[in-house]
Image: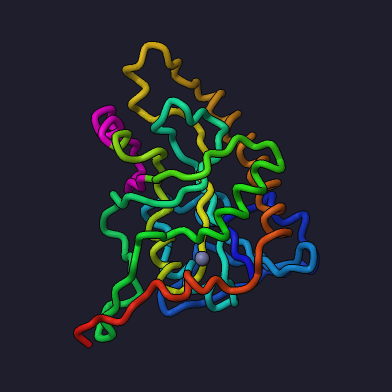
Amino acid sequence: MLGIFGGSGFYELLDNLEEVEVGTPFGLPSDKFMVGEFCGRKVAFLPRHGRGHKIPPHKVPYQANLWAMKELGVTKIISPCAVGSLRRDIAPGTFVICDSYFDRTRGRIDTFFEGPDVRHMTSVDPYCESLRQTAITACKKLNVPVVERGTIVVINGPRFSTIAESKFFSTFADVIGMTAYPEVSLANELGISIANISLATDFDAWSHDEKDIKESSAQEIIATFNKNIDNVKRVIFEIIKNADMNECPRCKEKVIQSKFN
Ligand SMILES: [Zn+2]
């Protein structure tokens, strides 16, 4: 089954739609799941911020969300998120299919292994290459501007970055968001393949000092955000149609037992 972090507006295309509540040892997920079928494939949608967007990024129950996905039988996750662009050539409206992340969050529980079963996990390829390629192909087919790899820096929020922070991040990352971590590491620990789709909404704070980049107005940001939602919906359903539903052997072997056990 495919799992998707996405809220209302995504369900109308599904057959046999069903609302499912899943309890976990880590509490309740952000909301009830909407489970249904598209082109004969089972999909489960979960609004990351809950219905009505009531949960801020630093309070999303990441552990419960990922555990519940596993419980439902999800083997692959598509994880779209709104981001700021850290690069001139990533214009608002561009989708970046990230292949790495840089964690700048704090206080979020980012593991299921709290002992006595001590485990470590590789993070050299956190996003599933095969699912990434499916996402890239979908964007190209639908003429959505796409950047095929990139690093997302994940900040704690809810505040945005200062100009100094943003300039520093732009030396090593391409986009900036608030929710991609620990979603990715928790999925990796559960052996679930995950692909991130970063939806560039505006240029981040670094652009404030650049005379030739005009700051987006609130209306422009909302217009881009809405266009991105529309595009990501089309991309997601294209991915659902084409994703290889066999489990990815690479994604299943990322967790390793501690050598000291
Ligand atoms: Zn994989």
Q: Is residue 145 left or right of residue 56?
A: right
**Percent of width and height locating residue 101:** 37, 51
Decide if residue 197 is on the left or right side of residue 100.
Answer: right
- The residue shown at (71%, 43%) is 141
Q: Residue furthest top?
A: 211
**For residue 192, above or below residue 125:** below
Residue 4 location in percent, x, y?
A: 59, 59
Report the residue at 57% width, 38% height from top.
146
Image location of residue 130, percent across then percent down: 56, 60
Which region shows up in magenta?
153-168
Coloring applied to the structure:
rainbow
121 or 183, nearer to the observer: 121
Q: Can residue 129 be found in the magenta stretch?
A: no
Q: Nearer the viewer, residue 253 or 195?
A: 253
Q: Is residue 2 left or right of residue 49?
A: right
Q: Is residue 4 above or below residue 120?
A: above
Task: Name the spot of residue 117 as percent of width and height, x first.
Answer: 28, 85
Front residue (pair 162, 128): 128
154 shown above or below 207: below
Q: Is residue 212 positioned above or below 232 on the image?
A: above
How many marks the image carries: the answer is 0
What quarter of the picture does the N terminus occupy?
Answer: bottom right
Give the quadrant of residue 181: bottom left
Residue at x 39% of width, y 40% of height: 176
Quadrant housing the C terminus: bottom left
